[in-house]
Structure formats: C-alpha cells, structure tokens
Amino acid sequence: MDVDAYTARHGPEWQRLQRLVARASRLSGPEADELVTLYQRTATHLSTIRSSSPDPALVQRLSQLVAEARSAIAGVHTPAWKVAVRFLVAGFPAALYAGRRWWLCVSAVSVVLSLVVGAWVAGSPDVQSAIASPAEIRRLVDVEFEQYYSSAPAGSFAAQVWTNNAWIAAICLVSGILIVPVVSVLWQNVLNIGVTGGIMAGAGRLDLFFGLITPHGLLELTAVFVAAGAGLRLGWTLVDPGPLPRATAVAAAGRATVGMALGVALLLAVSGVIEAFVTPSGLPTWARIGIGVLAELAFVAYVWVLGRRAARAGETGDVDEAGDLLPTAG
C-alpha cells in the first residue's frame, strides 16, 4: 500500500477529527454524530495501515488520535446486540478469510490422510483384526455406528456433541502457540475418521458411513479445521512474525484467535443441532446429506462474500480493534 497516497486521501478526515476532539465538550448534535463517524473511519484506517503497510510514525499518530476520540465519546456504547451483529458480519468472516490458507491446507491434508488410513484399514483384514475382534466389528457395523446418533434425546445429544467438539477446538486454539498439540489433535481426528470409515468400507457399509457422517460432518470438521488452522497460524507467528516486532505480531494473532474461538463455537453449535436432529432423522439419505451440503455451502459463501468484503475494508478479526468501532452517538 502507498502510505503517502493513503495519507493524502484520508488526511483531511483525520484533521477534521482532531479539530472535533479538541472542542468535544462544545459540539452540536450534528458535530457529535460527525465525531463518531470520523472516529469509526479513522479506526478502520488504522487497522488497514497496521495490516497492510505498518508505518510506525503513522500508526502512532493515528493510535493517539483514535484514543483521544474514544475518550471524547466515553460513556456512550453500542448496544450488545449491535456488537454481536458486527462480529458476525465483519470480524469473524474477516478472520476466516485472512486465515483461509491455513485452514484450507489443514482441511486438504486431513482429508487425504483420512482417505489413506481408511483405504489401508478397509483393504487389510489383519489390520481390522488388530483393531477389534470380528464380533466387535460386526456390532459396530450393524448396530453401534447408527445407534450412536439416537443414543440420547436430541437436545441433550446436541449439547453433548457441542461440548465435546468445542473442547477439541479449544485445544487447537489455546495450544496453537506450541504447534505440536494441534498436530496431535488433527492426527487423532484423522485416525478416528479413517479407522471407522475403513471398517465400515471393509464390511460393505460405506453408504451408511457417509449417509450418517456427511450431514453434520462437513460443517463440524470445517470448524475443527478452522480452529486448527488458527492455532497453527498463531504458533507460526511466533516463529516468523513478519515485518512487525515479534511481541506485537503474536499479540495481534492471539487476539484474532480469541475472536475465532467465539465464531468456531457458533459453527459447532450449528453442526451439533444438525447432528442431533437431522442425522438420526427419518429423512431420506439424500435429504439429510443435502442439508449438510447446504450448510457447508452457506459457510463458504459467508467466508468468500462477507469475509472478503470485510477484509478489504480493513477488518482483521483483532478483538482489540473492536472497541475502536463500537461507540455511537445514539
């Protein structure tokens, strides 16, 4: 980004904001509204400069201006529902879009490894016998795999599934700075899917496997991959912080990861509802799979439409910047 051109374009707005801040106690109603609007725009400009072309002098200047403007508007806050809406339509999708290379790579590698493990298990009776006895395999194929999804009342089952998956995602996000725990979680996930799928395929019940796992699994696995990608991105930032000082880069990545945790929890809640109410339902297989595919396509559109738009507007998903955009004059 050309910092000089950006400054020339938005400098008048910054100067106007500075003048309004200087006489904040004597502003008219329209001027107070203008103060809030310019404050929000300047906070976005600051975010854009930080993420695209960090200029220490300009960042310092705008940070001070934003802080002064925030103090001038202190005591007036955006309602909580507006904060939540802004997070859903800007912060979270922007963070997803910014980290897309990480979670897409995690997704691709995990899927390929799961297929390799599944093919290995399906094609080797010796491997299957080492995993479980013939009676246990038959019980899994004929009863347990399908019965699992209706083993508890739908509401309780949804809560149980959400709690379990949220715990897995939390491990990926919290321990991402260490990298190794995330890789371990992903490998366990690969083994669980590959081994179960391989056993079902070896018994000729791959149709049942995909018929039951696809409706909720698409979005559920995507959420886990997003969490793992965010965790690995955080860990790699410690190794290679880029143009920013290591502490600054890691702190920004960590704050973005906190925002990702909230969004991932929502994704897992949706997949948990699908797993509890759609997967074990009496709907035809094509209908259940269709619901899962639609949920996944909605997520993809969410990232590539809202996420790309928010990222281009300067959003990064950094929760520390959210406060710079929350105050209003109402």
Image: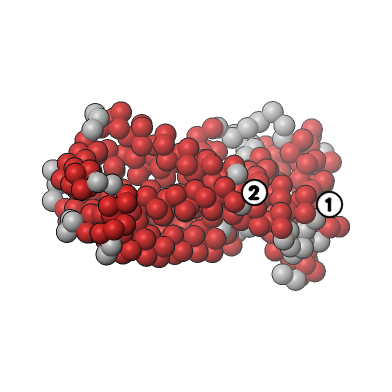
Report the residue at 24% width, 39% height from top.
Answer: 149
Q: What is the x, y in percent for residue 18?
A: 81, 47
| Residue underneath mark 1 | 60
Q: Is residue 45 above or below residue 138?
A: below
Tell me which amino acid carries mark 2.
Answer: Leu
Q: Residues within 10 Å of mark 1 (few under 14, many from 20)?
A: few
Q: Is residue 162 left or right of residue 142?
A: right
Q: Is residue 137 left or right of residue 46?
A: left
Q: Is there CB contact under 8 Å for labels 1 and 2?
A: no
Q: Earlier in the sequence, mark 1 or mark 2?
A: 1
Q: Nearer the viewer, residue 81 or 164?
A: 164
| Quadrant in which the C terminus appears | top right
| Quadrant in which the N terminus appears | bottom right
Q: Secondary structure at mark 2?
A: helix
**Visible residue check, residue 255:** yes
Q: Nearer the viewer, residue 142 or 208?
A: 142
Q: Secondary structure at mark 1?
A: helix
Q: What is the x, y in percent for residue 116?
A: 37, 65
Name the residue at the right extreme. Answer: 57
Q: Residues within 10 Å of mark 2 (few under 14, many from 20)?
A: some
Report the residue at 60% width, 44% height from top.
Answer: 175
Which numbered mark, 1 or 2, is in the foreground of this view?
2
Check residue 178 in the rendering and tell me which mark sits there, or answer none. Answer: 2
- Distance, label 1 to label 2, CA atoms, is 31 Å
